[in-house]
Amino acid sequence: GDRLRIADLTAKAARIATPDYYDRLAVAQALNQLGTSQADLARAAIRAGGAQTIAAWLERQGPRLARAITTLEQICGEDELTLSRLLVAAGQLQDVANAASAAAPSAAARPARTRGRGKSAASENRRPRKRAPASPA
């Protein structure tokens, strides 16, 4: 969040003049988009998994992320945040989040962990069923 300046954008967005309903709606949607993008990026970084650090994951995102960070720094460097700048920032983050989410392996694509001989964790926690006594035949 810090590197992507989301807190700065959110704080500055609170000071954007919103004279009418649609301006307020646009600010609210942009803030929602920022939050969603941040959550998507966090999920993609976590899914990348293992001993990998977040910094290494961020570096692997390449030029798209670098361009977005440059744009976000320029936008946040201005004294005043305008609605158009907020919308551009939200769009940039969403593009990065979409690309990162598409590149990260999904949980379904990773091999499942099993214990023992292919049993699921749920089946390991069950008590063995008592067998009915054999009927006299």
Image (tube, rainbow, N blue to C red):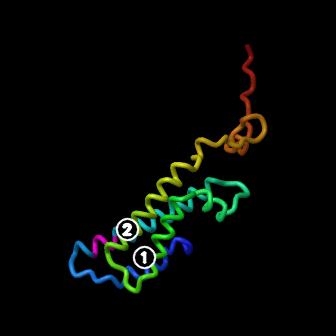
Residues at marks 2 and 1 touching, judged by CB atoms closer than 8 Å = yes
Is 9 in front, or is 69?
69
What segment carries the magenta color?
A: 24-28
Q: Which residue is mark 1?
A: 75
The residue lying at 49 percent from left, 77 percent from top is: 7
Q: Considering the numbered disc 1 on the image, is that residue within a helix, a strand or a loop?
A: helix
The residue lying at 50 percent from left, 70 percent from top is: 70
Q: Is residue 44 left or right of residue 76?
A: right
Q: Which mark is on residue 124?
A: none
Q: Which residue is mark 2?
A: 88
Question: How far apart, in angstroms, are the residues tagged by discs 2 and 1?
Answer: 9 Å
Query: Is residue 84 in the magenta section?
Result: no
126 versus 34 height, above or below: above
Query: Residue flagged by tag 1: what amino acid is it?
Result: Ile
Q: Residues within 10 Å of mark 2 (few under 14, many from 20)?
A: some
Upstream in sequence: badge 2 or badge 1: 1
The residue lying at 73 percent from left, 42 percent from top is: 124
Q: Considering the numbered disc 2 on the image, is that residue within a helix, a strand or a loop?
A: helix
